[in-house]
Amino acid sequence: MTDKKPLTEVEKVKAASHLLRGTIAQSFEVPETLGIPPSDGHLMKFHGSYLQDDRDLRDERAQQKLEPAYSFMLRTRLPGGVCSPTQWLAMDAISQKLANGTLRLTTRQAFQLHGILRGDMKGVIGEMQQVMLDSIAACGDVNRNVMCNPNPVDSSLHHEASQWAVRLSEHLLPKSRAYYELWLDGEKVSGGEEEPLYGATYLPRKFKVGLAIPPHNDVDVFSQDLGFIAIIEAGQLAGFNVTVGGGMGASHGDPATFPRLGDVIGFVTPEQVLEAAAGVLTVQRDFGDRTNRKHARLKYTIADRGIAWFVKELEARLSFTLGPARAFAFDHSGDTFGWKEGHDGRWHLTLHVESGRLAGQALVGLREIARVHQGDFRLTSNQNLIIASVPAGERAAIDSLVKQHGLDGYARATPLKQRALACVAMPTCGLAMAEAERYLPALTEKVEELLSKFGLEEEPISMRITGCPNGCARPYLAEIALVGKAPGRYALYLGGDLKGQRLNRLVEENVDEAGVMATLEPLFAAYARSRQPQEPFGDFFVRTA
């Protein structure tokens, strides 16, 4: 007799999947449905895709005795968010031809396509492959898209750091050939295939990596399972401080789940980065909880066993000892909009993209820009877009197209709008309990009305909203955050900081819009009346609440 907990169903699916193949090929051929079985749905995440349905149509279709309006969401793997004009045009074309006509820029610096029908999935992935893009491991219990500060302005060291993001992404990729076999007609491998890093059942849950370059913390490095903070000494990249155990996800009403900030555990040289990353990943592979998916992230492994245990276990797997962490300082976690001249004399234009959603005239304008642009595009961690590396002589032409197609909204957006983030939520995300992306414009307008009432409309307050507590828009770091609980109702969190170094705290468990405004109004009044010079709202709340 044993009290050992059973493995989750997902663990059993992974173990029986023949390294992520499952019965996906057969499921995609079943004519009676546009969906796929749940077991293959779990495996599709490793291929970068989720099965979704249009929740706005659920009741109507159920009344008509029709199955849900199934379609797939697909994410790209785009380390550091760097994308060529050719790749941009390809993603744009795919979105128009094989998806729902929009592109979404995610908070992990990747593209997200929505509305892909089952029969078009192979075409989407095939067209992406033609421009050297893929969706391998964009979702699933593996390392996800590696984030990196996309700012090309400050120094050549940003390019060096972004190259480490690419190397990390490649180093931590699954080795299974299932993706190529299923979607790209790759030759089937007969026997002997292994996953030397992940093993046959991969990780207990998702794993996220981000690289930050002080003083910018736009990747919210402390929210990552594994973070690397660049240390610049004498103008050179000396190495990285390593952080472990960050994570945003939680469950309402379950105190055993919680957001957590990563711990700084030491310093590595550039040559040690890949080994350190693999070491952290394999500790989580071997010790993460495979019996409860709500308790399966690295943050819980560390919370249960302690950071000292983790460092000892990690160093036992490394050929070196972590060095002492070195000094660093962050001053903000947002984006800087408009034109900026880079260290190399080229220019970079950061555009504001509300909720990261591009559609209609905005996509037309960016299509025209991509056809003449000589540099690259960079997706930011805050759902915005940089038209990067524009030669000085081409700046006027780019600026003309930006204004012609209404892409210059960054110049008119208020500080609150510029910093606001939202997850997709309704109608496609199956986890959403409330609106987020579709509600954000109305929410910001309401909050701005309150700020204006007290002369605070120019304050750079960070606000984030998600449709559920899983935290895709990293809400628990914002000065103001709404986390969906039910249609029209949210948990309200306050007190994060502008540097991404402090978690906010729950203020109201279940409020509607009127309740949110009723809570914020006296706080804004007090902030306008009693704040210290240059004191951010989140700092004021923590000091006075």
Image (tube, rainbow, N blue to C red):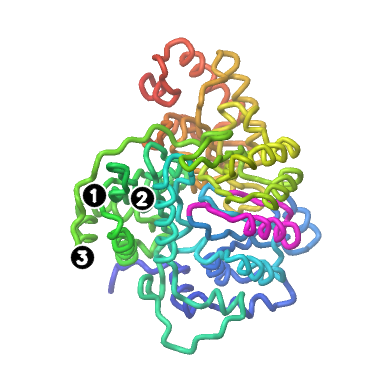
For label 2, the crowd category at 10 Å Cα-Cα, with few meaning under 14, some 14 to 19 and many 20 or more, is many
For label 3, the crowd category at 10 Å Cα-Cα, with few meaning under 14, some 14 to 19 and many 20 or more, is few
Q: Quadrant of residue 499?
A: top left
Q: Going from the N terminus, do you reach mark 2 or mark 1 first?
A: 2
Amino acid type of the residue that numbered disc 3 sits on in the rendered structure: Ser
What is the quadrant of the C terminus in the image? Answer: top left
Residue 54, numbered circle: none
Q: Nearer the viewer, residue 515 or 105?
A: 105
Q: CA distance from mark 3 to mark 2?
A: 20 Å
- Residue, disc 1: 266
The reply to whether residue 237 is visible in this rendering is yes
Q: Nearer the viewer, residue 203 or 226?
A: 226
Residue 482 horizontal/vertical position (percent): 53, 35
- The magenta segment is 80-105
Q: CA distance from mark 3 to mark 1?
A: 15 Å
Viewer-side label of 3, 2: 3
Q: CA distance from mark 2 to mark 1?
A: 11 Å
Secondary element at image label 1: strand
- Residue, disc 2: 227
Q: Going from the N terminus, do you reach mark 3 or mark 1 first?
A: 1
Does the magenta portion include 103?
yes
Asked if labels 1 and 3 touch by Cβ distance under 8 angstroms, the answer is no
Amino acid type of the residue that numbered disc 1 sits on in the rendered structure: Gly
Q: Nearer the viewer, residue 102 or 240?
A: 240
Residue 319, numbered circle: 3
Identify the residue shown where x is 59% and y is 36%.
489
On screen, residue 361 above or below 512: below
Secondary element at image label 3: loop
On screen, residue 531 above or below 16: above
434 to the left or right of 263: right
